[in-house]
Image: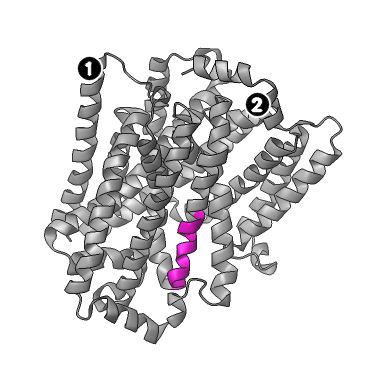
Amino acid sequence: MNWFVTIGGIAYNLIIIFVVYAFIRWKQSKTGVEDDFVLSSRKLPWLAVAATQALTALGGGHINGLAFQSWNTGIATIWYCIGTGFMFIIILRFNGIWYRRFGCVTLNDMFGKMFHPILMPILGGVGIGYCWGILCVETQGLATVISSLTGLSNLTGAIIGALTGILYVYLAGMKEIGYVNIVNASLMYLFGIIMLVYLNFATPEGWAGINNNILANNPDLLTVLGNPEILRTYVIGTFLACALGLNMAQANIQSAAAVENVQVLRRACTAAIPMNVLFGVIILGLGLAAMALPEPAATGNGAAGVVVLTLTYMPGWLQICVIGVFLAAMLSTVAMVALSLATMFNRDILSYFPYFKNMSPQKEKTWSRVWIVVGCTSAMLGAVKIQAAVNLGITWLFAFLVPLFFIFLIGMLWKRSGKAALLTLGISWFLNLVLTFTNLASVFHLEGNNYSIFMIILSTVLCFIFTALDKNRKDSFTKVYYKQRAAYDAARNAAK
């Protein structure tokens, strides 16, 4: 048990959260203007957008996931990071630009305007379910780190993690997330690089010994494409799922909707990619180092191995900083996912009820806080009580997003059909459920991340066919924008 490091890591995050909140309040007192909770009054600066994009996509998938997966697929695990990098290009240079031009806050609102209003509550329900699943996974990751350090139960670890995650967003919303992420992104690189350098001197043979150990025992782990089995079951599917599916997640979209203009998005893109991808490289390196050294290797998996690696070879002050950084990566995802869940509840579901229609910023802030607390506390219980179901459901959740991108692409660039969109989603989602919760995926050799390849091909073919067959199909949404550009631009500027 290591209470000193645990308390230090949590304190690290709480200090940053409260200092940033105090700074935001001080600035607001000077100007007399308080930015709205959900979108920061569409004034989020490019660096905050870049940091938020990067850290939202980090989370447990990078911290625990990359370290764990590195023991199975080695350097080829980097394709998860590369896929995420392409996701940023799609969001910040394509999707996000169109969300901003049409004045949309949620993906569901965009689809409702593009295809048919019925899609807004349908996708809102799916999006809320997806967000809740991700909250469960991230809370589970926080619980794992805290429990492994202290010996506390997973439930207690989840409670501590969830409460800290709530504070990340509860105090000041989108602006708080953005500014805390700027600080955390800077410190992540600083302490991550220090740890990599320190390992060279703290371990018996340095990085040369780590490299030689892996070469001697499993050389396939040090090639970027792995062996044919890794390439087939992990590399291709992982890259495509990250690049072409996660760009449809509301948590990744919302910060792109919180900017003043599309130039901010273009600028943010150049910073978000290295912020995220290179930190993934750091985690991957730590995971492989943990596999090659006796004490962390004895844990049996990369996620626990990296924690033991930190506690075994790093000095006390660096242990606190590194564990604090790991927690921050997961907390940032919890915060952004919780805010996006609240936004979809308010704008895509509750807006149909008179009491919630056209809410004032203050009322939306109040209800957003309610859904943030409800989402995080229920996910805390889900992470511990139904862990196996959540882990299985993540494949299902990711694959729910993949068809959306290709429907969006066809509607933006070719033709739009509400019937085609509904039929494509209905068939794709039904098969998704069947393949996820039966053994048919392995029968058809769709195990692992090959699953996403199937969903990409299926949804693209179906949407093209159904759109072509619809005699009432409409012009692409880009044509709609350019025909009425002045009206859309005026409405967008008025809504700032």
**Residue 456: horizontal and vertical position, in percent?**
67, 53
Figure check: 147 above or below 110: below
Q: Decide if residue 368 is in sight here.
A: yes
Amino acid on which disc 2 is placed: Lys
Give the numbered dot on residue 180.
none
Label 1 Cα neighbours within 10 Å, binned few <14 / some 14-19 / many ≥20: few
Instruction: Identify the amino acid type marked 1.
Output: Ser
The disc at residue 113 is: 2
Residue visible at 42% across and 29% down in the picture: 371
Sequence-wise, which precedes: disc 1 or disc 2? 1
Q: Which residue is mark 1?
A: 29
Distance in Å between CA atoms under marks 1 and 2: 38 Å
At x 27% / y 13%, what residue is drawn? 32
Image height check: is 426 above or below 21?
below
In the image: residue 72, left or right of residue 369: right
Would you place residue 283 above or below residue 116 in this image? below
Q: Mainly helix, strand or loop, the magenta region? A: helix
Segment colored magenta: 72-83
From the viewer's perspective, is 476 left or right of 255?
right
On the image, the x and y values in percent for residue 289 come to 31, 72
- In-front residue for pair 436/309: 309
Answer left or right for 394 relative to 43: right
Query: Which residue shows up at 48% across the image and 55% down it?
Result: 391
Image quarter of residue 71 = bottom left
User: In what element is the residue under mark 2?
Assistant: helix
The relative height of residue 203 versus residue 461 in the rendered view (above or below) is: below
How packed is label 2: few (under 14 Cα within 10 Å), some, or many (20 or more)?
some
- Outermost residue, bottom side: 216
Q: How many marks?
A: 2
